[in-house]
Structures are given as C-alpha cells and as structure tokens.
Image (cartoon, rainbow, N blue to C red):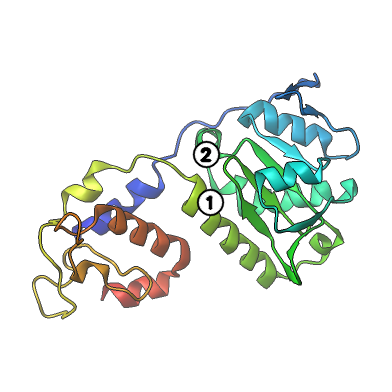
Amino acid sequence: MEKMKYYWGILLICLFIACSGNDDVDVIEPWEEEYTLPQGESDADRRIVDFYNQYGTYILYDYTYTDFRYEISSTMSVELPDPKYVGDMLDLLDDIWFDFYPAEFLKKTTPLKIMLAESIQYDIWPYFVLSGESCLAFGFCSDTLQKLTPATKVEFKDELQKTLWDYFIDIEYPDDFFAVSDYTYVANVDPASEDYARNRGFVANNNYEWSTSLNINTGMLSEETDITSFIAGMRTRTAKEWEDDLK
C-alpha cells in the first residue's frame, strides 16, 4: 500500500513556520465600510483584533440580520450572542480549529468573516456551524459553552472539520499521491486479487468502493474521488478503523 506512505505528505502539507501575533491596539479599518474592530463590547476584543492582524479575518458578534441573510441563509433565524461569552467561543475554536493548523495554513484558508451567534436555527433544529461563500457562522455562543460535555465538544469538532474540508480548504495536493496509482482500469473488492482496491492504494468513500467503476465522463477512475475519499477517511476514521480496513 505504497500510497499510504504519502498521507503525511497530504496532511502535513501546511507545516510552515508560525507567524507571531500583532500586539498593536490600533483600530482596524472597516471592511467595505461595514465593520470596525474592536467592536467594543467583549473582554475578548483584544484577541479578536490580534486574530485579524494575523489572519485577516473578522470575528464578529455584532452584525445585522441582513448581514447574516446575505452571508449565510435567508431561511435561518439567528440571535446575536451576549458579548461576555465570546471569549468562551474563541477558546472552543482554538481547541477544535485554530490549534489544529499552522499559522501559514490558517492565513490561506480562514474565511473573511466569522459570525458568532447565540443560536442559529431552522424551525426547531439548532446548528453549530454553517458556511457561506466567504463566511462561517457559529451558534451556541452562550452559557452553553461553559458546560459542554466532552462528547458534545467532539461532535462540534467533527461537524466543523467536515465543513472546513468540504467547503473551505482549497490546497494543492502532492503529485506523489496520484503518481503511484493507475487510474485507467477498475480495482477489485477481493482481497486475494492483485487488483484489490487496498493493494492499489484506494480506500472506500464511506462504505462505497468507488474504485470498482470507471467515471462515465472520462473512462478512468476519478483522481478527485480518490483524494476526497482519502481526506474523508483521515478526518473521520479512528486508528483502529484504519487498521481494520487496511488488513
């Protein structure tokens, strides 16, 4: 399974020297004359300004419903957060997002705006994270954050990582990942076959063995499905699940 040697190359592609934060307290010029940092109501304002200085992202807790409808959805209801819980949300995002990736990678992939909300709901269903073209919106910026169970925190982490990798992570993958595979013919699900999918370096997309059928448009196996299936596995599978699958 030669391709498995390259998974570190894929996931560690972003390992660069981290940039230091900016300690200046200057007011940030408004984006499109809409927002000025600091917004002035949270003890976490200094952290928000520092984050902008380092990554160029506005973390917002004071915005209009029109902003939210334009950036995220016109079908959702949203409540602005109590600013006193913004620091708790930043702590959570450190744990489940920012601390996972080097600074240079965050600079390239973090959206322009991060909107914080006490609640984001469609009918009775609450959402933790929703994505727009250049924005992420987070619900549960409330006292809920001060009593999160470890299980709920993991659920939030998984939901966020799926959103990031599905919609916001746009990077070039190493050519070596594709160079070791032959995409001109199908793989086999029989472990005894020399063309067994795992022997060919292909992993399933969830439970779907995509490499057993050719793309009807290209007549070849899909390189895009190959990388997305692999990334999805790295994001969702435990070490034990990988071990069982790669036997």
Quadrant housing residue 241: bottom left
What SS does tag 2 mark? helix
In the visual, does 39 lie left or right of 5?
Answer: right
Q: Quadrant of the C terminus?
A: bottom left
Q: Nearer the viewer, residue 241 or 175?
A: 175
The residue type indicated by label 1 comes to: Leu
Residue sitting nearer the eye, 135 or 101: 135
* Rendered view: 129 above or below 28: below
Residue at screen point 32% across, 43% down: 173
Camera-side residue of 19 and 39: 39
Does 44 appear above or below 7?
Answer: above
Residue drawn at the location 79% of the way across and 52% of the way down = 117
- How far, Cα to Cα, is label 2 from label 1? 9 Å
Sequence order check, earlier mark of 2 and 1: 2
> Residue visible at 10% across and 63% down?
185
Q: Amino acid at mark 2?
A: Thr
Say few, some or many: other residues with alpha carbon within 10 Å of mark 2 (under 14 / 14 to 19 / 20 or more). Answer: some
Is residue 21 visible in the rendered image? The answer is no
Residue underneath mark 1: 164
- Residue highlighted by disc 2: 109
Inspect this view and state whether residue 27 appears: yes
Residue drawn at x 77%, y 35% as measured from the top left: 47
Estimate the x, y position of residue 246 in percent, counting from the top left.
28, 72
Please tell me how many numbered marks the rendered image carries: 2
Please give left or right for residue 69 compared with residue 231 in the image.
Answer: right
Q: Give the secondary structure at mark 1.
A: helix
Query: CB atoms at circles 2 and 1 under 8 Å apart?
Result: yes
